[in-house]
Image (cartoon, rainbow, N blue to C red):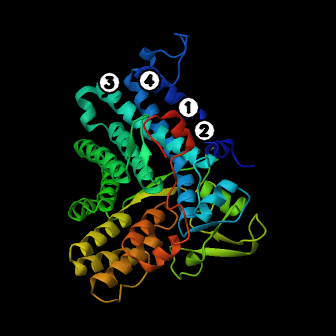
Amino acid sequence: MKSKEIRNKRNGTSSPLVLLIILFSVAVSGCGLFESDNPGSILADDINDASTIPFLVNGQKNELALQLDVAVIYSGLLADELIHSGSYPTWREMSNGDVKEDNGDVGGIWAGLQRSRFLGDDNVPRMKELLGEAAASDVNVASALNYSGYAYLLFAEIFERAAYNTGPEVSRAGSFQLAIDRFTEAAAVASAGGHSTQLDLAYVGLARAQLMLGNYQAALATANQVTPGFEFFINYDAQNSNSVFFFNHRRAEYSIREPFWNTGDPRVVVEYTGGPGADNETPQYLQQKYNDDISPIRLASGMEAILIAAEAQNETGDQSGAIASINFVRQNAGLGNYEGANTYEAVRDAIRLERKYELFLEGKRLNDLRRYRDDGDAESVAFFQNRISDALPLPDSEYRTNPNVGP
């Protein structure tokens, strides 16, 4: 049987640990999300202690984990990575590219990502107050800022628009900028404290957001600061298992789309079961990137940073530098060097192919496809041609509770 936490993710609820931390945060901040007439239930003095900081940050990371694997599935269904092969009508909407505002799974991931970024945005000021000057170099402060930054990145990349704290509508560019603000501060804190892992994590997220905003020189400068061998994984366990594996291998609720069947690339290994998925119709292909319920998901990596650098190099006229970056990534995967032409178009297409395979099932393909479509790429244009949705819409719950947004 699948764990309770996975069922909770599909219903948009958090684990008991995360809900408790949200209650803690709300109690201290004075936010009206949870009202209580019992003054002894949660006391601010019990929470406003530096010893609670690791607990708060771990809860934020757990909430991000609860949403990341789901984001990989939903964005993959909206893109050319995954196709629905099961019984969930909400997932079929995504796979068909026609997602409605009342889709319950859209509301679930929306609420979860809101919790993740709220936990960081609300708790970082409290950490600064509790730690004083030490906050400027504290690893927990850097971590909380980074996890918030990645939540904002996911909002920008998988939703058509966003809104925060019952505020006005925020564009994708606005969400990318909110991510940049958090990553910039996280990098400063991590650098001051010598926290290399959090520094690399901040730089990858920052370079990613800068690239998406077309700030190529800034993206290149940031990406070049990432340790090439860096990888940061979000871990899963028996209580909070990897949904990407579970719903493909155990439930056959989604299959892999044809562009990823026979790539010949070791980074994209897919196996055909010989039969259909749970819908008794769609050929069931199994991804092999995540091979069990506790497989971690890579949130950020040096290889992603190098591909960001390659794209920025190519966009600024340095095709030779971009080819060198491509070759580094290919050699890391055990592949031979790029053998194409030293032209902008050829190098651009090579970078796009490397991103397609290197970042397979990491939740980044949907945003890439939209970028390529907007740049006139024929394959991407054709993919979206008969699809209404190229992202998740704001859920109807946001329309009901936020007077500042409209259809």
User: Which mark, residue 31?
Assistant: 4
Badges 1 and 4: C-beta atoms under 8 Å apart? Answer: no
Q: Comparing marks 4 and 2, which lies closer to the viewer?
A: 4
Tell me residue 256's x, y (percent): 62, 70
Q: Comparing marks 1 and 4, which lies closer to the viewer?
A: 4
Q: Comparing marks 2 and 3, which lies closer to the viewer?
A: 2
User: Which mark, residue 19?
Assistant: 1
Q: Label 2 crowding class (10 Å Cα cut-off): few <14, some 14-19, many 20+?
A: many
Q: Earlier in the sequence, mark 2 or mark 1?
A: 2
Left or right relative to 256: residue 367? left
Residue picked out by circle 3? 130
Name the secondary structure under disc 3.
Answer: helix
Residue 138's place in the image compared with 364, above or below, is: above
Name the secondary structure under disc 4.
Answer: loop
Residue picked out by circle 2? 13
Badges 2 and 3: C-beta atoms under 8 Å apart? Answer: no
> Three-letter amino acid code at disc 2?
Thr
